[in-house]
Image (cartoon, rainbow, N blue to C red):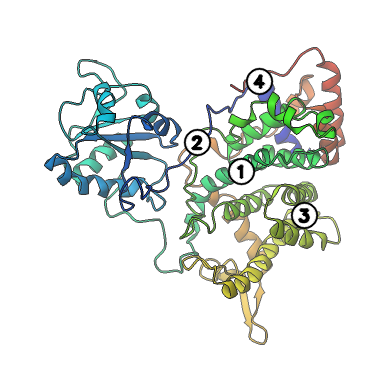
Amino acid sequence: MSSLLRNTLLSLFLLSFFGWSSASSGSRSILREIDAENGDPRDYGLDLNLTNFDSVLKDTPATYAIVEFFAHWCPACRNYKPHYEKVARLFNGPDAVHPGMVLMARVDCASKINTKLCDRFSVSHYPMLFWGPPSKFVGGGWEPKKEKSEILIIDDGRTADRLLSWINKQLGSSFSLDDEKFVNDHLPSNVSDPGQIARAVYDVEEATTTAFEIILEHKMIKSNTRASLIKFLQILVAHHPSKRCRKGSAEILVNFDDLFPSDLLLADKQEEIDGKGPLSSFQICGKDVPRGYWMFCRGSKNETRGFSCGLWVLIHSLSVRVEDEESQFAFTAIRDFVHNFFVCEECRQHFHEMCSSVSSPFKKTRDLVLWLWNAHNKVNTRLIKEEASLKTTDPKFPKMIWPPKQLCPSCYRSHIQRNSEIDWDQEEVFKFLTNYYGKTLVSLYKDKDALGNDGAEGVVEELVASTNALVVPVGAALAIAVASCAFGALACYWRSQQKSRKPRRNWN
């Protein structure tokens, strides 16, 4: 049994048995920049007031928040601001050194609109700093006589050094005011040392989340695209490098028939589908995925890199995880997903043309990995010329042929000076790609239990043999059968046995 079939069956079984849920309480926005109209654009600390305090702290993906209550007329507050800003630089804004960890905000108690808000937190002096999970600030407050509270007063943060030291004690970290973005100064800015790709796992999660948000927003699930989405979800369930993305993908796959009934899709009644399901608030990789930061894939400008880079990393990471017998299925799933759901028209046309040039089915993982690598370099070669002529190149992250020699010396045999072509050692390239997008990608994840394999090799065989309740939607059976006739048969059998019982799920 292939790993695609094993992992998909196990994920779907566990989902039906334990009632996994990845529902989110609502959409989230990331605070990337300070609005120049509402404050100094050079400020890193976020200015809040009564009207947006709860909503911002509710929506932030940061794990913790610091809120400074101050008064603009207070000399001590004015003198403290540079200290607060030095620390906020590390955590806030598009150039944050350690994004997604701490949201640093401030409230001006001298503004009448904030009187009730400052009263909620019993502000007795300025500046006064509070620390806690963002959710605890929402609709909440602080009382000096309350013995137990998840909101703490920061009692030793009068300088930038002392404030950061206090934060380090809470997080068990060793951040420094001199920390800079994770780059290798000895190489061009987009030629990272191998360890940097480990941060891309966050970008893979965000790219997955963004892709499905786009699909829903543009109502792209039609009768003729339904099967291709099911196939791609199968690949995600089995091989996504993030467990929480695998979990969310499985939940969508399990409930696919209920969420996207084929009869309504055939009748082109997308508005009825949107109205009956809760997917507007569902996050495929869970509600804790940081949004808008783009760590490995961050460009020097908001309009460069980001989602397209994250999607490429996702595709490469999937390719190195499939087994030989899954390679053709993975290729068609990726090809059809990009063709049907990537909203850049020119990009998907170019990709589809390259896919159409494949003359024979893939039989080896190696062939798929190298084909995608070569295709990506062809795209970069074309974009290098286009961006140079249009002057749209990201100056800090120009497109390049990859991997660079600094990153993989053994991948290069020699340069043929006649036409500047590279003589690649493809065996070395394959080894490098497998390690780079495989083990290294997930090596630094802060919660390694959210990644990696489920450690269930061999267990699935028993599950398949012993259970009569594998939760597989009937609409998925066609796509599943393409990968495995046995899986398709199981799907049909399950449906026949479970007509009177709906799979257990919780979307709210």
> Residue, x 85% and y 35% (percent of image)?
478
How would you rate the neighbour count of disc 3 (Cα within 10 Å): few for under 14, some for 14-19, many for 20 or more? some
Q: Amino acid at mark 3?
A: Lys
Q: Amino acid at mark 2?
A: Arg
Residue 250 in the image: x percent, y percent?
A: 68, 32
- Label 1 or label 2, whichever lies nearer to me, is 2
Asked whether, in this view, residue 252 is left or right of residue 243, the answer is: right
Whichever of labels 4 and 2 marks the residue nearer the N terminus, that label is 2
Residue 261 in the image: x percent, y percent?
A: 79, 28
Residue 288 in the image: x percent, y percent?
A: 49, 34
Whichever of labels 1 and 2 marks the residue nearer the N terminus, that label is 2
Say which residue label 4 marks: 505
Whichever of labels 3 and 2 marks the residue nearer the N terminus, that label is 2
Instruction: Check disc 4 and report its element: helix, strand or loop.
Output: loop
Say which residue label 1 marks: 208
Q: Which mark is residue 364?
A: 3
Between the C-alphas of marks 1 and 2, the distance is 15 Å
Whichever of labels 1 and 3 marks the residue nearer the N terminus, that label is 1
100 versus 54 height, above or below:
below
> Residue, x 85% and y 34% (percent of image)?
266
Q: Which mark is residue 28?
A: 2
